[in-house]
Structures are given as C-alpha cells and as structure tokens.
Amino acid sequence: MIKTKKKFDIKNSMRKWCSVHGLMRIGWIVVRTIILVGCCYTILYPFLLKLIDSFKSFEDYLDPAVQYIPKYFTTSNIKAVLTQLQYKKSFPITFLYSTLIALLQVFICGLAGYGFGRYKFRGSNLIFGLVIMELLVPPQTMIIPLFLRFRFFYGGLNLIGTYWPIIILALTGLGIRNGLYIFMFRQNFRNMPKELEEAAIIDGCNPFQIFWKVMMPNAVSLMVTVFLISFAWQWTDTTYTELFQRGTDLLANMTAYVDGGEEEIMVLQYNNTAAVLCVLPVMLIYLIGQRFFIQGVERSGITG
Amino acid sequence: MAKEHSGKGRFVRKKGVSLSEKKNRMGYLFIMPVLIGLVFIFLPSLVKSFIYVFNKVSIGFGSVEMEFVGWKNIYDAFFTDTEYVVLLVSALRGMFFDSAVIILFSFFMSNVLNQEFKGRGICRVVFFLPVVLSMGIVADMENANEMFNAMNAVEESSAGGFDQLGMATMFSVANLLNFMGLPASMTQIIFAILSNMYGILNSSGVQILIFLSALQAISPSVFEAAKMEGATKWEEFWKITFPMLTPSLLVCVVYTVISTFTNPVYGVMEYIQSKGFSGGQLGYASAISWIYFLIVIVVLGVAAAIISKRVTYLD
C-alpha cells in the first residue's frame, strides 16, 4: 500500500488538479507565491541596497553603468564610518547595555506578568489597567515630565547624560513598550495548567520558587521573544537615547556624528553605511534566535 | 491613603482572611517593581504634564519654574499656531487610512502565513524582520534620506533607475484601471496603497505576530468537527476563524492606532519635541501633546466600542 502511494499516479493527480476546485487551488498558489515573494522583496530590497551601497566608492556614483554591483569595490567607507562611530568602544558598550536592559525587562515584565496572570488580589484589574494605559499614552505626553524627573532626580541629582535613566525605567517596568511585554507574559502564564503549580506546592516550593523553577522554564520561548524584541528596540532606539543619554557612547548616539564630507552623495552613503553597521549585529542576533522567536509567537497565545 | 486602608484591614480582620486571599496577596510582591514605577514615576509624570498644560514652564537653576496662564496654551494651539492644526488634521487623515490598510493587510497576511507551504519558515523570518528593525535608527535614517531625495529630485528630475521606472509603470496601471471604468477615487486609493507598500509592511509586523499567535491557538479539533458537519472552507473562515480572531482584532486595532499616531512620518511628534526642547516652550508642548493624547483616546474609545460589541470570547 505504502509503495503504491509513493508512486506518481497520473489518474489521481489529474482528478486532483484538473477540476474547477483544482484550478482554483493552483490559481491561489500562484497568487500566494506572487504576494509572498513581492512582500519579501519589498522588505529586503532597501536593506540589501544599503548593504551593497556601503561597498561602493565615489567613482561608482559617477559611473552611469553602475546600478547595483559596484565596479570599484572598496571597504574604505566602512572603515571610515567604523572609526567615526568609534565602533571599538561603542559596540561593546551598546552590546552590554542592551543586554542588561533586555534582561532586566524580561525579568521585571515576567514577574509582573506572572503576578497579573496567576493572582487575583485587590486592585489587580485597576493596576493592570494602568499598565495598559502606559501603552496608550503617547511618548510625547510623557517625555517632558520624564526628562525633568531625571534632570532633577530625588535630591536634585542630574541623571541626564548618564546610563541610569533607562536602567531605572527598565527596573520599574516603564521602558519602551513594556506594557506590551507584561501583557504577553500575563496571557502566557494565564494559560499554564494549574496542576504544575499544585505539584510544586506539594513538593514544598514557595511562590518565588514556583515562579523561578517551574513557570519561567516553561516560558522560555516567550522569554527569548521578549528578550530579542527588547534588545533590538533598545539597540536601535533613538527617542529615549537622544533624550536621556546625550554624550554617552551608545551607537545610537554616535550615528549623529557621522560626517560624509563635502560631497552630498557621500553624506547620504555614510549615513546608510552607519545605519547598516548599527543594525547588522541586531539582525544577526535575530537570525540566530528566530527559531525561538517564531515558536514563542506561536505559544504566546495572545487572544485579547 | 491606600496604605492606611490595607494596614487597617490587616489589624481588624486578621481572623477573617481566607487562605486563598492570603495566597493572592503574594501577587503584590510579584508586581511590586511595576507598582513602584507606576506610583512614583508614571502617575506623577502624567499628572505633571497635565499641570504643565495650564502653565508657562521654564527650567531655572536647579528647579522648574511655573507661571499659571490658564487656557492660553490650548487657545494658542488652535487659534494662534499656524502649523499645529494643519499637522493634526493631516495626521488624523493619514492615521485613519493607514490603520485600516495595516489591519486588513496583516489580517490577510497572517492567514496566508498560517497555511502550509514550502518556505513558510523563511517567509515568517522575513515578515517579522521589521518588528526588530523598523524602529529607531533605521526609521530616522530613512526619513533623512527621503528628505534628501526629495530635495534632489527637484534638481535632477532626469535621473533614471528603479524608482523612476516603478513610478512610470504605476501611472500606466492607474491609467489602465481608469480606462477600465474604475472611478478615479478608487484608483487613487489603490495607487496610494501600492506606493506605500514598504511603509505598510514595515509597520504591520507586530500585528501579523498577534494575529498569527491567535490563529495558532485555535485548536484543530474545531476545524475537524466543522469538516465533519460538511462546512466549506469559506464557511470555516467566517464561522470559526474570524470569530476566534475578534479578540486579537481589538488588541491589534488599539496597537495600530497608537503606533500610527506616534509614527514620525506625520511630523507631529517632531513638532512637539521641537517646541518643547529646542523652542523652550515646555508648557505649550505639553498642551499640544495632551490634545493629541485626548484625540487618540477618543478615537480608540470609539473603535473599541464598535469592535467589542462583535468580539466573541470562548468562555
């Protein structure tokens, strides 16, 4: 039976494909492929173009025959931008800082999400409403008081221009779109079976042990997802960074100092190269973690 | 006041606290960091920015100086400022159009990405790429490049290349559609969508993510049962998939409206920042951002009210 099934059966496949239903199916597959390829192309094209552009030399721009592939291949632009970005100094700092912030956000939001998803205490709905409110308030409304809060921190400390403001925001669950993470974690922990918790209680776990040893390991894919998103958003963030951390050595700050010289086309190209160099590490980390990312998406079960 | 209340409760009703209530109090410990953030940073900032609306604010030496001016800031926003209302109206128009397109598109794409086909994994990786990459630095650079290109386009309109070619074919497509008898307004809409495809794809990553996770959460046995009853694919979609997705539709609408509102493309955010920081008019900047915020709330309230009437929950 199995052998005949594997063999190409023309009668069966004729019946399968050469009917109105089959033709519609083929039509849909064609349309779907066109849409998907088109969309993927639209997403990837600008990035690939920027990547290629960063290898072009000035002569390539003068040469009308060069559209995509550079004739005078050069890495001098990249080297120049690397020194202008102070990559050797700014890359490790940005990497460590983004990792720290992302870890803090995963931990704090996971904690809060667990609290909201598993416990029904007095005022929990009200507090959760405030968390959602965090998402609703446009950053513009909050930016000025937040700036002043960190400009004159308790006791008149000036925290602007240091690494502290975003650490404090991450510690208190107020970082970039943390409301969304808390929401995702809450939804995730809500769907976990009660038996897990009961078994842990019988084994003598206290609530924090349950959280740390039972619940968190079961939410690994969501944790990786949130980590990736928050890492990337922290890495590429310019709003908070420009506001609170002017003068620090973060990559997002450094892009402002990239200078392409006199020629307009080179100014544009240096900017592009800087963007590529900033984003490339994030992209690599995303590609490494994407397996977890997509699993995490599938399991987070955000159903409103 | 809240502190007093809980303290009182602890002493008076110590015997009355049930075990589950006691257990549930642990929840406060879990959300403590967030609670501290809300009470000490979020709420004060929100209240403060509301107070700034009615004041003239300036940063003095070591402190913030305020001077009460009443409704002047709000009056100025609507009747004195020549730019703000124009920006606001164009942002509102763009927002309605963009959010509608983004939601429809991400709804459709999530259904496509949920089907089984070869290369689905790669497609998903590419589609979620904008979630990671489209914010911050990249968006800033793109805006800068667009400005630069717009400036240069006037100077050298004869330059060839991809964009020129793309535009030319687009125009001929629009002509063709017109010729076929489609009204001009329709072709304009199609044209607008197609020319903004990149922006739409970039801003619908999170929405596709939300819809897709909801799609995955529907148990296959529901579809099996429907098949046994003789439902067609079309009926399956409208009777099972769509109702099951309505809760996440609500989440998506909220998220889309917020993110399109704060999209730098419309320039309102930059305008507020320029007034507040380079212009030094902190009170005025607060006023215009609160007007913006209240409009978002009203829009969201209306949208949520309309949708939540149709939302179906399983339990």
Image (cartoon, coloured by chain):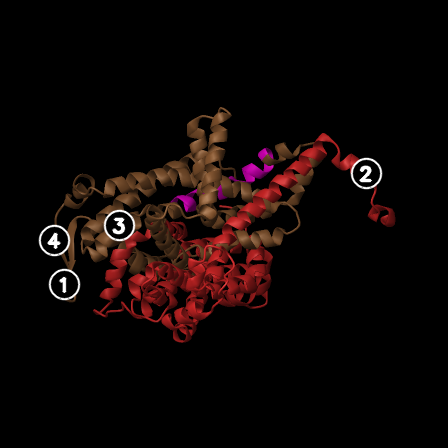
Chain colours: A red, B brown
Q: Where on the picture, by quarter, is residue B39? A: bottom left
Q: Is residue A174 magenta?
A: no
Residue under label 3: B271
Q: Amino acid at mark 2?
A: Asn
Residue under label 2: A12
Q: Nearer the viewer, mark 3 or mark 4?
A: 3
The numbered mark 1 sits on a residue in which chain?
B
**Residue, x 37% and y 45% (percent of image)?**
B157
Which image quarter is the N terminus of chain B in?
bottom left
Q: Position of residue A161 (x, y in %)?
A: 28, 69
Residue under label 1: B60
Q: Nearer the viewer, residue A73 or B216?
A: A73
Q: Nearer the viewer, mark 2 or mark 1?
A: 2
Residues in magenta, as a range? B238-257
Q: Amino acid at mark 3?
A: Tyr
Give the secondary structure at mark 1. loop
Q: Position of residue B308 (x, y in %)?
A: 45, 37
Q: Nearer the viewer, mark 4 or mark 1?
A: 1
Q: Nearer the viewer, residue B37 or B236?
A: B236
Can residue B251 be seen in this snapshot? no
From the viewer's perspective, is residue A205 above or below residue B13? below
